[in-house]
Image (cartoon, rainbow, N blue to C red):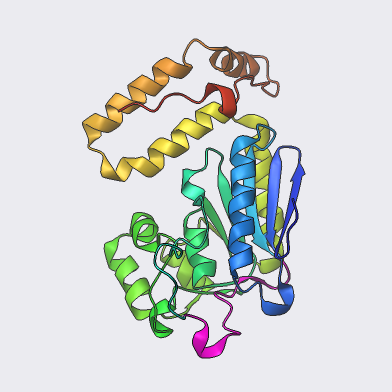
């Protein structure tokens, strides 16, 4: 896959996507968005990919939109050609877990793209913020949907409406990440977590759990119960359900056989 502003590596079931403009603190460009979307699609379709880790090259994760264009950086775009999503598909729609290894500053779309991920590891030294209202524009990449789900309405309103920058400690306290680590430990910790998921979890079980988890906020308890039951009927009695129990009893690593590309269910209504 030819890329200009990202790098892609796949090893032992873990895909590592690196935003790769370190001289510009990985400032986001249209090319970066297209490449990230292509990498996400590849990961979703490839059964060799079990877990995805997204990080940044150098000392930042992503410093936000590239403002090299000055006053034209946010020029009006043609109707029908522009999307505030920044890239497609969003990480929360993928059937694989996505871990954001925020190895440094994540500002603007640098943070909103990370909010789409399932897990975020924060660098203590990093600065974080959805600063778009301070740039004369507004939050993007589904931030009005993802952020309230992560931190609640009151905290989301403070983050989005003020556009202020947060320290690593404050971002962690507000619930933007599951771990707060020294910057040089973020990526190793994310890869260790990814390898554990790749080696010890059943891919279809993870895929349906992730999909229902993101969907659950729009469902009633009864609807969640209905979908959990329907999805159990899809996976119970199949080879992974037998293998998981046997591997535990035999004290060995599991060898799961179901594949997301082939065995992901028709989603229950």
Where residue 61 sits: x, y (%)?
A: 63, 68
Residue occupying the point 53% across, 71% down: 168
Left or right: 208 in relation to 187: left
- Most prominent secondary structure in the magenta stretch? loop
Q: Does the magenta stretch include residue 66?
A: yes
Tag count: 0
Where residue 7 sits: x, y (%)?
A: 74, 57
Where residue 255 sits: x, y (%)?
A: 68, 21
Q: Quadrant of the C terminus?
A: top left
- Would residue 123 be visible to someone looking at this image? no
Residue occupying the point 43% across, 70% down: 78
| Of residues 52 and 248, the one drawn nearer to the viewer in this rendering | 52
Compared with 221, 162 (above or below) is below
Magenta region: which residues? 57-74
Compared with 137, 12 (above or below) is above
Looking at the rendering, which quadrant does residue 188 occupy?
Answer: bottom right
Where residue 116 sits: x, y (%)?
A: 47, 55
């Amino acid at each position: 896959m030819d890329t200009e502003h990202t790098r892609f590596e796949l090893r032992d079931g873990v895909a590592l996507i690196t935003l790769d403009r370190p001289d510009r603190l990985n400032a986001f460009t249209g090319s970066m968005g297209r490449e990230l979307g292509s990498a996400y699609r590849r990961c979703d379709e490839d059964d060799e990919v079990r877990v995805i880790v997204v990080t940044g090259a150098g000392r930042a994760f992503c410093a936000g939109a590239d403002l090299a264009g000055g006053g034209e950086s946010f020029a009006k775009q043609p109707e029908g050609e522009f999307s505030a999503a920044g890239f497609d598909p969003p990480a929360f729609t993928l059937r694989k877990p996505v871990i954001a290894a925020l190895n440094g500053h994540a500002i603007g779309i640098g943070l909103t793209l990370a909010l789409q991920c399932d897990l975020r590891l924060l660098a203590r030294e990093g600065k974080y913020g959805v600063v778009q209202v301070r740039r004369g524009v507004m939050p993007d990449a589904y931030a009005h949907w993802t952020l309230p789900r992560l931190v609640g309405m009151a905290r989301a309103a403070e983050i989005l409406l003020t556009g202020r920058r947060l320290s690593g400690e404050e971002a962690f306290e507000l619930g933007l990440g599951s771990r707060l680590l020294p910057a040089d430990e973020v990526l190793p910790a994310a890869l260790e977590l990814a390898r554990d998921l790749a080696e010890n979890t059943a891919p279809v079980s993870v895929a349906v759990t992730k999909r229902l988890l993101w969907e659950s906020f729009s469902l009633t308890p009864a609807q969640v119960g209905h979908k959990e039951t329907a999805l159990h009927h899809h996976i119970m009695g199949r080879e992974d359900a037998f293998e998981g129990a046997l591997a535990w009893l035999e004290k060995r690593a599991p060898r799961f056989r179901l594949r997301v590309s082939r065995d992901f269910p028709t989603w229950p209504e």
